[in-house]
Amino acid sequence: MIKKIFILVLFLFAAPFFAQEKFTISGIISDSANKETLIGVSVFVEETKSGLVTNEYGFYSITLPKGNYTISVNYMGYQSVKEKIELNRDVKKNFSLAVSSQQLDEVVVLDNKKRVDIRKPEMSVNKLTIQEIKEMPVILGEVDIIKSILTLPGVTNAGEGQSGFNVRGGGADQNLVLLDEATIYNSSHLFGLFSVFNPDAIKDLKLYKGGIPSRYGGRLSSILDIYQKEGNKNEFHMNGGIGLISSRMLAEGPIVRGRGSFVIAGRASYAHLFLKLTDNPNSAYFYDLNTKLSYTLNEKNNIYLSGYFGRDVFQLNDTFVNTYGNAVLNFRWNHLFSDKLFSNLSVIYSDYYYGLLLDVIGFNWDSGIKNYNIKYDFKHYLTDKIKLTYGIQSHYYDFNPGKIEPTSASSGINRDQLDKKYALENAIYLDAEQQISKKIAVSYGLRLSSFLRLGQQTLNVYENNQPVIFNTAFQIYESADPTGTISYGRNKTIAKFDNLEPRFAFSYAMDDDQSIKASYNRMTQYLHLISNTQSPTPLDVWAPSDQYLKPQLLDQVALGYFRNFKDDAYSLEVETFYKKIKNRVDYIDGANLIANEAIERVVLKGRARAYGLEVLFRKNEGRYKGWISYTLSRTEQQVPGRTPEETGINNGKWYRTGFDKLHNLSVVGNYKLNEKWRFGATFTLQTGQPVTYPNGQYEYEGITVPSFNTRNENNLPTYHHLDVSATLTPRKNKGRKWQSEWVFGIYNLYGRQNAASITFRQNDETAANEAIRLSIFGIVPSATYNIKF
């Protein structure tokens, strides 16, 4: 009897495993014309009403019980593919998608793709296709990725003509910008007029504002993840454009037909050449170069080598020359251990350089930051319901706060090198995405990060370990005088930090068309941008965390409702968020940040918070497409006194940060009239940037001195402008191998004089006080001629 019971229990336990014999379908999805792998392609199983999207290298893997299935492969702008598969063994299945010009196909693409998105536990993520970006009107005729993401909810600009962007009330330094996994420290050309990303060379981009997977770290507010094209593996092609300010050219083709490819793209501006024709000795220009090589060794191994190099030059006569820019290089190896386990090994170098020549004073100045990074990531498709992502990462930082050299022996300037700083940041992470039921899906993960602040450096020692002291007599903060110094060797540890960063996201699908999602994430940022401007400038210096500059810690929660209407012709996303930040620094009044070897003497530690509501409504198909995004948010900071006697900043009360924008509205529309003409328009409306105006004045020894109230109590005037564009695509003649198009645009159609800043002065004639508004752009027309062959 006992033996029979044992056999029965064993049978009942093992029966599900035998009944649920499972096999795996996996492969690569690519463009049929150029063999470029496609990111984010929807792979939908109609029988199970479930699916997934391809990873950053076009790979997918689905494990299902033995049986017959209909696999639907869909991607925006491509013809959808359906194929019936008898699954009685592991199947290696690659798909090649053809570009579609039929609207009906695009409807099918949207349908299954949106169903996957609705059910995925992914929120606070925005994606824009390169085609959408290229159809948007932009300033000076140059397609711009950074300015395109400013039309998304929760994203604002740092000001008219300013570089960088702000996400959900975070600083521009809290955004991690990645190009092929390499860090870009300054994302702008010409002080914000252009971005460093050549749109012709870009393949895919994704902006994470919350619910950030644990494979990302090091920043608090957002991750902008951008991948470059791999190149055409079948044929050689070139395309480019000639504009009023700049031109660009891209070449791509096979190294070995069907197996390897290359891409090389260059851009340069030349407006400064016209200045020279007028005997104007000043100039401002940029140039950059993108390149990528890819090669398939065999079915299980692919290698990639990608790089970027860019420089900006700003010159006044021959006495002032400012040069700055990024350089990155990345080698990647993809290896497929099995049909369920995909890996990527990356070795990355990033360099940001800033140089300044002041011949009037007689010196050269340069500073920057270098980053050496190695990372090994794995994607493990355990079952049809569970997917793991895990890996290790290590960053070594080399900070150059500044080096000064005389331009001649008679300049009177002594050579000096501010102490270089070094740091090591390591992380190990694990992410899991799990389908619990037909309606509920979750993702959860944990990141363990470690940061070592390393010598070689001589540091100041202060009384009571306080580099900033409070003057009770004048009720102001002042820099403390060092009481001594302490020296650290090259590999000695100055400070060490460890942090656990949990991540969680939840999705409840009410039906195929609507869902509710929630997320929580903790992030740690060990780098600080030393700047008292509202947007990054080339002169800003990055500094590592140490015993005085503590790591910034963020906790963010978000809740959202997502809905598709009329077979996905329309979609709605509504999210609300709240986040708080510890150890956010601010500066004492009168802080000097340039070439400051002891930056701890001018900073105070505080905290910040941001909360708001975001709405995104999109029209996804038809001749007219576009979206409306609106954000209602508030961003505040608090620096309380360290003792009851200290006032803190703003008397310890919460005050608005310099990038607080209560209202942010964007309306984007594209209209296809016919095969020749396409029109676009973008309207932007934002609350003016917070500023501090003087509220009075007094005289001291004959000098008029303004007095100020609390920080950021005032606002610049409301910021708004309307941009329009028209694209003419002539009909292609038979036998002609090249295609062309004209893009005409007008930035700021009605000539709004948006204030970049407002300054106050005393009129020399009337002696009355007056406010002076600085506006950078009025109406800016543009024309670009694009070619492809």
Image: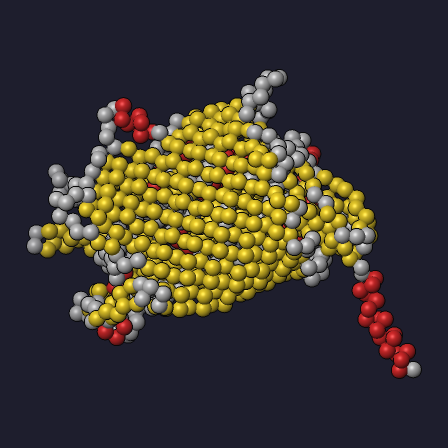
Q: Quadrant of residue 84?
A: top right
Residue at the spot 39% in from the left edge and 27% down from the top edge: 244
> Can residue 682 be seen at all in this image of the molecule?
no
Which percent across, then down, holds residue 17?
Answer: 80, 64
Question: From this viewpoint, is residue 357 visible?
Answer: yes
Q: How many numbered discs sit on the rendered protein?
A: 0
**What is the basis of the colouring in this image?**
secondary structure
Name, please, the residue furthest toward the top. Answer: 734
Image point (30%, 71%), residue name: 642
Question: Where is residue 416, by image quadrant?
Answer: bottom left
Q: Nearer the viewer, residue 271 or 252?
A: 252
Residue lying at the far bottom of the rendered structure: 2
Residue occupying the point 55% across, 25% down:
789
Indicate left or right for 463 with 723 as reference: left
| Quadrant in which the N terminus appears | bottom right
Question: Residue 739's spot in the image, x, y percent?
Answer: 55, 23
Please state the horizontal and vertical placement of residue 217, each as a whole percent of the image: 48, 58
Answer above or below: position of 641 versus 683: below
Q: Nearer the viewer, residue 272 or 395?
A: 395
Residue 41 located left or right of residue 65? left
